[in-house]
Image (cartoon, helix red, strand yellow):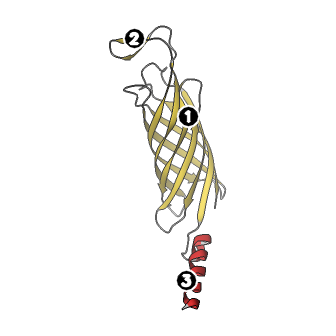
Amino acid sequence: MKTSCATNLVFLCFSLIAPGALCQNSGFGGGVFLSVGGQSSHTPGVGSGPVIPLVGIYAEWLAPHVHPGLDLRFEGGSTGVRGTLVGPRASVSISGDRLHPYAEALFGPNHADIQSTGVTIIVPGQPVPNTNRDGVTVQGVIGVDMDISQLLRWRFEFTQSRFSGIPDSHPYAVTTGIVVHFR
């Protein structure tokens, strides 16, 4: 009985440490990315079409079909909503493992600089002086990474957001950039 329990414990530890040994084409992967793109002006009081840089990191389990993982990213820029987002992701590999479409659901604390020449109307009928706003952003992401080489990928991404700091804020963005992928 002790031998069986010890064997099961060793097998469990081995499966947690080295999942690639148990399933063909499995293991852990991830990457670091840098993207830039344009954001829509669907945020009251924020200028039209601010450029947004993104930098982030993701990790995923390379299971045989769907690759579940986690994404952490930082949105920047001088205007618009910026901050930190984190959340789950899922990807697949298609077209001979050269295309990697993914979807993510991200959330996190963000900050918005509201800058205009006069008074900003945030709620209809209630003028508010120029101010900065803090809130939480919820963001849906779809995108695709395309292999350039064994280490590099090119990324195209679409995001749709909601920012709690500004009512009726629902900007979307289209970004592109480079990913350094590790397997």
Residue 68 image position (x, y, % from top left): 49, 59
Crowding near pointer 1: few (<14 within 10 Å), some, many (20+)? some
Nearest to the observer: residue 152 or residue 85: 85
Residue 166 left/right relative to 25:
left
Contact (CB < 8 A) between labels 1 and 2?
no
The residue at the point 58 percent across, 71 percent down is 16
Which residue was labeled with disc 1? 83
Q: Quick one: SS at disc 3?
A: helix
Q: Alpha carbon of mark 1 to alpha carbon of mark 2: how far?
A: 26 Å
Q: Residue 8: which disc?
A: 3
Give the x, y percent position of residue 171. 43, 31
Residue most extreme to the top: 118
Point 51% across, 16% down: residue: 131
- For the residue marked with disc 3, what is the amino acid? Asn
In the rendered image, the vertical position of residue 11 relative to residue 91, given as above or below: below
Describe the element under mark 2 as helix, strand or loop.
Answer: strand
Q: Which residue is mark 2?
A: 127
